[in-house]
Image (cartoon, helix red, strand yellow):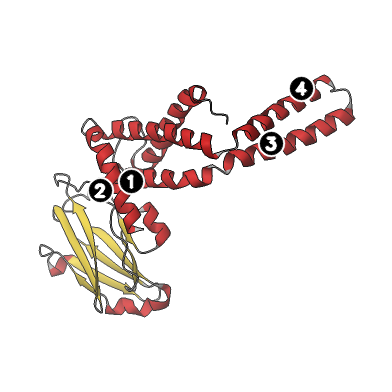
Amino acid sequence: MDFVNGLSTDIFNIVLTPLEMIHPEVAIAVVSALFGILGLVIFKYISAQKGIKTAKDKIKGHMIAIRIYQDDLAVVGVSVGKVLFQNVKYLSLNLMPFIPLSIPFVLLLSQLVVRYAFEPLPENKPFTMTVEVAADQKDSVNDITVIAPDWLAVEDLVVVRAPSEGRVFISVRDAQAGISDFAFKIGDSIVTKPVVIGAETEAPRVMQPERVAGFFDAWIWPAEEMIADESPITRIAIEGAYPSRSFAFLPDGILGILVGVILYSFIAGLAILKPLGVTI
């Protein structure tokens, strides 16, 4: 999964760099629109276009029959049944191609989220991190050693262990601006989590509030490598995540990314639907 995420990150770097120099919302709009058009082209060739058109035509035909023979209950009953059957067929023919299309959609969404959904943590404010271990290794939380950045004084770091939950809570009272690595050692395994602090900090190109071990979680959080399988640690997260970025024309944070992708891809797809000759 790290290879897929690394490759998609490189591709999106090439595509998004010139666009985000204008404005992040321009990058979101353009890439989402391109995805909408590309998705429609792919849909045209992986879907049963003739079957979709036939199902739509039959639905229209049976609806006309209901209108014409509305006084004949037998004809109306049969036509209603056929409309329902053709609707199920129509929906299945449309939905099946969206299963493979969901893969690039998730990659697009996750890449935009880690790039544009968040802002760094506020400087000189407290924050909490959570370290989780595998369900069958809950007692290992007692063996986790926290390696904090050099700037963090001992009195400003509070570590609370909860073996029953398989978690360790790390509270930082006075956050210093910069990009700092928090490391967690257990046995021979050391897992790090970069934390970006301060509005004036030159944030990395991508940042995410969690580092994960699971395959499916890695689809959602592609900016950092997966935690190695041999480590008991399965997740390191900033509680409450990073603050949400504010957008001018979209909702804040992750919701704004989701709305933007759906809205701009839908508009672009709708505009190009007839010129491409796609039946939906």
Find the distance from the CA under tag 4 to the CA under tag 3: 15 Å
Snapshot quadrant of residue 188 = bottom left
Q: Quadrant of the N terminus?
A: bottom left
Label 2, on which residue? 206
In primary-sequence order, the first of circles 3 and 2 is 3
Label 3, on which residue? 87
- Look at the numbered discs 3 and 2 and tell me whether their residues touch, using CB distance below 8 Å: no
Disc 4: CA contacts within 10 A as few (<14), some (14-19) or many (>=20): few
Q: Is label 4 in a helix, a strand or a loop?
A: helix
Q: Is label 2 in a helix, a strand or a loop?
A: loop
Residue lying at 21% horizontally and 62% vertically, measured from the top left: 172
Label 1, on which residue? 111
> Which of the labelled discs sits on residue 267, or is there none?
none
Find the distance from the CA under tag 4 to the CA under tag 2: 55 Å
Q: Is label 1 in a helix, a strand or a loop?
A: helix
Find the distance from the CA under tag 3 to the CA under tag 2: 43 Å
Label 4, on which residue? 64
In primary-sequence order, the first of circles 3 and 1 is 3
Q: Quadrant of the C terminus?
A: top right
In front of the other: 79 or 54: 54
In primary-sequence order, the first of circles 4 and 3 is 4
Find the distance from the CA under tag 2 to the CA under tag 1: 8 Å
